Each structure stands twice: as C-alpha cells, then as structure tokens.
Image: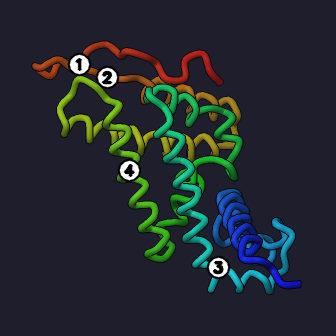
Amino acid sequence: MRVTREKAAENRERIVLAASRLFRDKGFDGVGVDAIMDAVGLTHGGFYRHFGSKEALAEEAVAQGLAAGAERLAGLSALDRFVAGYLSPAHRDDRSGGCVVAALGGDIARQGPGVRHSLTGYVRGQLDRIAGRITGRGEKARREQAIATLAGLVGALMLARAVDDPELSDEILEAGRNVFGREQVSDDEGQRSEPLSRLGEGQG
C-alpha cells in the first residue's frame, strides 16, 4: 500500500522522537535500528526510506531533544524554577525523557560533527538564556556565572544518576539546588548581596 506524503512525514517524526528517547536511555551504541523501528511499529527496511544511516538519525534525534530542552527554559521567567525542575528526583529518574546533555554528554563528544554542532548551538543558547536571568552584575560576570551554572547542573545530574546510594543521590540534587538555585546580585562596587531565592527549596 502506498504511503502518503503526510503519513511518511508522520512516521519520520515518530522515528526521531523514539530514537531521541532510546538514545538517552541506552546510549548511541546501546540501541540499534531494529529496536528504534520496533518502538514505532515499523519494519527495519523502512528505516532507509527516511534516513541514510543511524548517524544521520542521531543528528536529528539529538537536535530534537536539545530543542525541547531549550524550549522548557525559554518558557520560564525565573532561573530558580528551571534549576528546581532540572535537579529534581523526577528528572533524575527520567533519563529517556530528560536532558540530552546529561544523558549523552560523554557519548556526544565521540560523535560526528553534526551531533556536536547541534550541542554547541544548544550550549551557546542556554548560556545566553541563563545569563539573561542573572541580575545586577556586569556582562562578563553574568557570562561566567552562566557557564558555571550550566556545567554544575549537568554535572550534578550526571553524578546523582551514577551513584548507587539513593541517599547520596538525593543529597547531590539538594546541594545543587542550594548552590545553583539562587539569583546572585551585586552592587556597583561588585559586592555580592544575599541570595534572592533558593531554587528547589521545598521540592523533591
């Protein structure tokens, strides 16, 4: 039976979404084309009508996951809400539906230029968004704090997922929320004030 153009586009989107989740859950090398196609109820042979290779699919799957993550932060007016959600037990436990960078950061460094280029664009965009939510400091200081915050969030989530002690994992998340979940402001002379808010307080 001939597949309509609309149905083909729908199938392609489903493949990308399934691959994005499976890659985050099992890693690029931990899932094959068969498993991805099985997840959407399509045949292995149909894969190559949409993608030239698994690597080509990985580029689109990573880009899709990163775009979804960027959209979540863009929709929040306060950095504390983002940090609270990012370093929550729910996000820690949802590897397949969570942050692409925390799930695949090490793997992405070993992927081709397309995947790494998508990550680079995402990191630049997130740094700009985070810096824009930091108030009362100079541009260079906001940029440095944004870099430290993004790196700290990703690292804390990866560590919380990696340890096999649930109490330690929760402790890592809480510490990350306390450290990164605050808006720091400074006066014109560069003196840092008290935190305006604590991200994640009372959550998780």
Q: CA distance from mark 1 to mark 4?
A: 26 Å
> Along the polypeptide, which appears first: circle 1 or circle 4?
4
Say which mark, if any, is on residue 184: 2
Q: Amino acid at mark 4?
A: Gly
Give me the C-alpha separation between circle 4 and circle 3. Answer: 26 Å
The residue tagged with tag 1: helix, strand or loop? loop
Q: In this picture, is 71 found above or below 33? A: above
Residue 189 x %, y % = 10, 19
Mark 2 or 4: in front is: 4
**Foreground tag (4 vs 3):** 4
Q: Quadrant of residue 116?
A: bottom left
Can residue 99 be seen from the camera position used here? Answer: yes
Query: In this rendering, would 19 be left or right of 150?
Result: right
Q: Nearer the viewer, mark 3 or mark 2?
A: 3
At label 2, counting other C-alpha atoms closer than 10 Å, the crowd grade (few under 14, some 14-19, many 20 or more) is: some
Circle 2: residue type: Gln
183 in relation to 165, above or below? above
Q: Residue at x 49, y 47 (%)?
A: 70
Residue for point 50% across, 36% down: 75
* Labels 2 and 1 touching (C-beta < 8 A): yes
Residue 125 numbered mark, or none: 4
Q: Locate residue 181: give its quadrant.
A: top left
State whether residue 131 is above or below residue 5.
above
Label 2, label 1: how many angstroms apart (C-alpha)? 7 Å
Q: Which residue is denoted by mark 1 in the rendering?
A: 192
**Circle on res. 54:** 3
Single out the mark in the foreground, 1 or 3.
3
Task: Give, as a three-letter code, the residue at label 3.
Answer: Lys
Q: Circle 4: is it few (<14), some (14-19), or many (20+) Cα within 10 Å?
A: some
